[in-house]
């Protein structure tokens, strides 16, 4: 039984749900009350509905639990989400940015984006599905506006390059990015730490300063989240 829901001390739009036994779970305020996305639990507290945020299903939740100190995604932000899949994490990003923010959801797999549209975007006016390949940002430049932050979670080689190419077109000024590195998608022969270093070096050559590199175990094996800020252009 949930006995309290409070704002996260550092991240606006993120909440802690506290249970009677003292345990806590992450949550976001549901932008679409009564509607779930991935069978997550809904909780009501003081006439407000929240969605529990499962770190085993969402790398963004995992990195918060693993010590993230700086959250580029804030209320009222415009966000470019590369690799939105069927919308599990993207829906929580939608909750965080709220009705005054916006989330551009780029996804290449037709089946995934059908689920994204039918189960998520249809009910959330602050989300736009974009059926495109994140490696080719020029092809959707007319569909995506300038954004405050980019979240990249793609199972492809050259993940940092793809992020950098999108940042060149869409990221405002000294914006920030979150890059979920999937080491085995880049090089199965290398130790994950070497892959993370390789991708960091690519971002630094693209004029980014690395703020943090946070492993995602035990929620995701051989994954890490890179948080970076683009230096003034």
Image: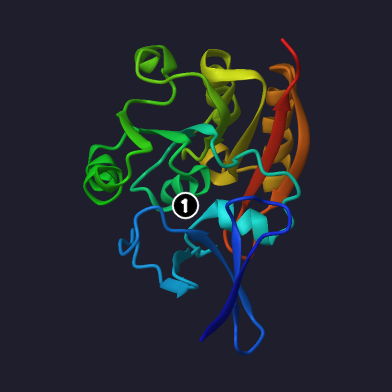
Of residues 224 and 141, the one nearer the viewer is 141
Left or right of 79, for residue 205:
right
Tell me residue 161's x, y (percent). Answer: 58, 23
Residue at figure coordinates x 60%, y 37% from the top left: 179
Outermost residue on the bottom side: it is 21
Of residues 197 and 115, the one nearer the viewer is 115
Residue at figure coordinates x 72%, y 50% from the top left: 214
Of residues 115 and 180, the one nearer the viewer is 115
Left or right of 156, for residue 160:
right
Tell me residue 120's x, y (percent). Answer: 30, 48
Q: Report the coloring of the rendering.
A: rainbow
Q: Quadrant of residue 183?
A: top right
Of residues 163 and 100, the one nearer the viewer is 100
Q: Residues within 10 Å of mark 1 (few under 14, many from 20)?
A: many
Q: Is residue 190 above or below residue 79?
A: below
Outermost residue on the front side: it is 47
Residue at figure coordinates x 73%, y 58% from the top left: 9
Tell me residue 129's x, y (percent). Answer: 31, 34
Per the image, label 1 sits on a secondary structure element best described as: helix
Q: Quadrant of residue 130?
A: top left
User: Circle 1 sits on which residue?
Assistant: 92
User: Which quarter of the figure is the C terminus placed in?
Assistant: top right
Total of numbered circles in the picture? 1
Tell me residue 195's x, y (percent). Answer: 67, 39
Q: Is residue 59 above or below residue 166?
A: below
């Amino acid at each position: 039984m949930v006995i309290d829901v409070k704002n996260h001390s550092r991240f606006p739009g993120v909440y802690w749900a506290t249970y009677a036994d003292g345990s806590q779970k992450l949550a976001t305020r549901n932008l679409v009350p009564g509607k779930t996305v991935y069978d997550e639990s809904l909780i009501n507290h003081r006439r407000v509905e929240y969605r529990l945020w499962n770190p085993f299903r969402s790398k963004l939740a995992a990195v918060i639990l693993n010590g993230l100190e700086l959250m580029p995604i804030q209320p009222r932000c415009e966000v470019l989400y590369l690799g939105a899949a069927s919308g599990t994490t993207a829906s929580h990003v939608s909750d965080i940015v709220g009705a005054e923010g916006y989330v551009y959801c780029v996804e290449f797999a037709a089946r995934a984006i059908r689920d994204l549209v039918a189960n998520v975007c249809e009910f959330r006016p602050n989300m736009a599905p974009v059926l495109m390949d994140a490696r080719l940002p020029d092809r959707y430049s007319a569909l995506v506006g300038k954004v405050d932050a980019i979240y990249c979670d793609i199972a492809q080689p050259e993940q940092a390059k793809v992020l950098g190419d999108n940042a060149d077109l869409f990221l405002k000024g000294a914006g920030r990015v979150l890059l979920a590195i999937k080491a085995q998608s880049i090089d199965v022969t290398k130790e994950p730490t070497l892959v993370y270093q390789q991708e960091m070096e690519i971002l630094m050559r693209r004029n980014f300063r690395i703020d943090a590199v946070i492993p995602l175990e035990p929620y995701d094996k051989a994954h890490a989240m890179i948080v970076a800020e683009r230096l003034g252009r």
